[in-house]
Image: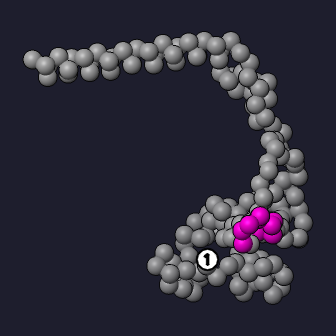
Amino acid sequence: MRRAHREGAAVMIRNLRVVLLVLAIGAGTGTLAAQSLNSGLRGPTPLDSEGPAPPMMPTRNTSEREVRNYPEQPPVIPHSIDGYQIDLNSNKCLSCHARARTGESQAPMVSITHFMDRDGQFLASISPRRFFCTECHVPQSVSNPPVSNDFVDIDTMLSRAAPGGRR
């Protein structure tokens, strides 16, 4: 009898929790809909609306290599790739960055890691899993960040003196 009583009480408490949760969500939704929240990315557009698309910013087009912020970060693309075809049959990036083309193009060669298969074996050509460059490498635009960022790279962190600790 006591066991049945305890199980019944547990079910009632569980049901009460669900009801309270539903009420809390309903109360919160009403206040959110009434407010016009402003975030750095959405601007003044209400949460239940879709705002206008931001204008396309021009692509940064330079021959300078960008500094990487962390080990193993894929390098960014410092030039425009508008109109580049990268699909199963063609990869425009390799017309400059392939091993055989870097002498005349003066572009950096594709990393040796791109010639490895998933088992770590080296291949004679680019691995199929590394063929689609823009999965990891991205062009940069000339724009200001939409939200502030206080990212500090590892070299800066290591160069800061830690009181009482080693560097």
Looking at the image, which residue is at 44% across and 15% down?
A: 20
Query: Residue type at mark 1?
Result: His
Q: Is residue 10 above or below residue 110?
A: above
Looking at the image, which residue is at 70% across and 78% down?
A: 110
Q: Nearer the viewer, residue 137 or 131?
A: 137
Looking at the image, which residue is at 76% across and 31% down?
A: 39
> Hey, which residue is sitting farthest left in the picture?
1
Residue 162 on the magenta span: yes
Q: Nearer the viewer, residue 58 or 158?
A: 158
The image shows residue 69 at horizontal and vertical percentages of 76, 64
Can the viewer see residue 82 in this picture?
no
Image quadrant in which you'd find residue 67: bottom right
What are the residue bounds of the magenta stretch? 156-166
- Give SS at disc 1: helix
The image shows residue 70 at horizontal and vertical percentages of 71, 66
Q: Nearer the viewer, residue 151 or 103?
A: 151
Bin the neighbour count of mark 1 within 10 Å (Cα to Cα): few under 14, some 14-19, many 20 and up: some
Q: Is residue 127 left or right of residue 54?
A: left
The image shows residue 56 at horizontal and vertical percentages of 83, 44
Residue on which the image places disc 1: 114
> Hey, which residue is sitting farthest front in the picture?
164
Image quadrant in which you'd find residue 45: top right
Image quadrant in which you'd find residue 95: bottom right
Can the viewer see residue 137 in this picture?
yes
Q: Is residue 143 above or below residue 121?
A: above
Q: Is residue 164 left or right of residue 125?
A: right
The image shows residue 96 at horizontal and vertical percentages of 77, 77
